[in-house]
Image: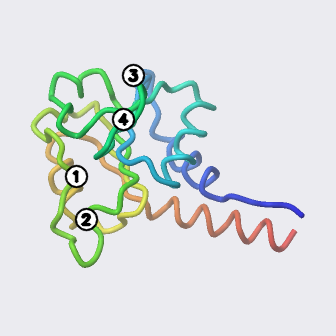
Amino acid sequence: MHGYNTDVTGFENSLRPLLESHHQKALVLGTGGAAKAIHFVLEKLGIIFLEVSRNPISGRQISYEQLTPALLEHYMLLINTTPVGMYPNEQDCPPLPYEGLTPIITCLTWYITRPKRCFFKRSGAGAVIKNGADMLVIQAEESWRIWNA
């Protein structure tokens, strides 16, 4: 038996073209299964990360309440792996200090593909944003390659 995971390929190939020298550290919003694939890619690329959770449990996690504009200055990648902002609650936003986002911060999201969603509207004011659409295409292509090889 063999197991395959296209999440890693999809995220890595979606992230790589965006990376610049200042992308040394990342904040990963969420701690679920999608976050695990993100961790794998970030570790592979040598990017230090910190998880943000509603209920932090370890030294690698902080709460949303601990996020400040000053903290954002040290993390140039912000990766949302939560379903916050998805149907039917599309107007919901992760509780972030959006005023602390700058043009050199890159915001990516795992699930959300529509730029009209709250996360994009609020992040786009001061940061580079990227939705999850091409990641889904990359995952589909990888699945096709796996099953038709």
| Quadrant location, the N terminus | bottom right
- Residue at 65 percent of width and 59 percent of height: 6
Is residue 126 placed above or below 58 in the rendered structure?
A: below
Residue 101 image point, x, y percent: 19, 35
Q: Quadrant of residue 2?
A: bottom right
| Quadrant location, the C terminus | bottom right
51 lies left or right of 48: left
Q: Quadrant of residue 5?
A: bottom right
Q: Residue furthest bottom?
A: 88
Residue 92 image point, x, y percent: 17, 63
Q: Earlier in the sequence, mark 3 or mark 1?
A: 3
The residue labelled by disc 4 is 27
The residue labelled by disc 3 is 22
- Residue at 49 percent of width and 61 percent of height: 134
Residue 46 image point, x, y percent: 57, 24
Marks 1 & 2, CB-CB < 8 Å contact:
yes
Amino acid marked by disc 3: His
The residue labelled by disc 2 is 85
Q: Residues within 10 Å of mark 2 (few under 14, many from 20)?
A: some
